[in-house]
Image (tube, rainbow, N blue to C red):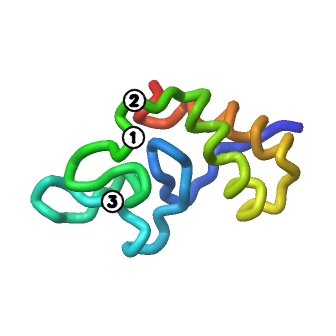
Amino acid sequence: MSFKKPTEPLCQSCAFSLKNHKDKGTEVDGTLSNDYCGDCYESGKFTEPEITLKEMIEQTVPSTSKSRGMTMEEARNYLEFLLPTLKRWR
């Protein structure tokens, strides 16, 4: 299966959709982040600063599987393709 990087705005840590303002994290000054979701980023800091790429992939497989209509294996393969291209993991 080949994958394409989505064109919608994504969290640059977990690949969660950032289409809705309510899903965005916050900077130190309280403004919304255009790069990270609220689960990954609050007040200008990562909520889990020590998490590894592999741990992030495993943590997000279930929600990606559900939101994208993929099997768990397809979601894992997709995340292994996508996450390393995101800002946090480059």
Disc 1 secondary structure class: loop
Amino acid type indicated by mark 2 = Glu
Identify whether 28 is placed above or below 86.
below
Residue 49 % position (x, y): 35, 34
Q: Which residue is mark 2?
A: 50
Identify the residue at image location x=50%, y=54%: 10
Q: Which mark is residue 25?
A: 3
Identify whether 56 is placed above or below 29.
above
Instruction: Determine which quarter of the picture holds residue 74.
Output: top right
Classed neighbour count for the residue bearing mark 2: other residues with Cα under 10 Å, few (<14), some (14–19), many (≥20): few
Instruction: Determine which quarter of the picture holds residue 7.
Output: bottom right
Q: CB atoms at circles 3 and 2 under 8 Å apart?
A: no
Q: CB atoms at circles 3 and 1 under 8 Å apart?
A: no
Disc 3 secondary structure class: strand
First along the sequence among labels 3 and 1: 3
Q: Residue furthest left?
A: 29
Q: CB atoms at circles 1 and 2 under 8 Å apart?
A: yes
In depth, the one of 82 and 22 nearer the eye is: 22
Q: Which residue is mark 1?
A: 48
Closest to the camera, between mark 3 and mark 1, is 1
Q: Which mark is residue 84?
A: none
Query: Total of numbered circles in the picture?
Result: 3
Residue 33 % position (x, y): 29, 57
Amino acid type indicated by mark 1 = Glu
Amino acid type indicated by mark 3 = Gly
Distance (Cα) linking label 3 and label 2: 18 Å
Identify the residue at image location x=89%, y=38%: 1
Relative to residue 50, is residue 71 drawn left or right?
right
First along the sequence among labels 3 and 2: 3
Classed neighbour count for the residue bearing mark 1: other residues with Cα under 10 Å, few (<14), some (14–19), many (≥20): few
Disc 2 secondary structure class: loop
Identify the residue at image location x=54%, y=32%: 85
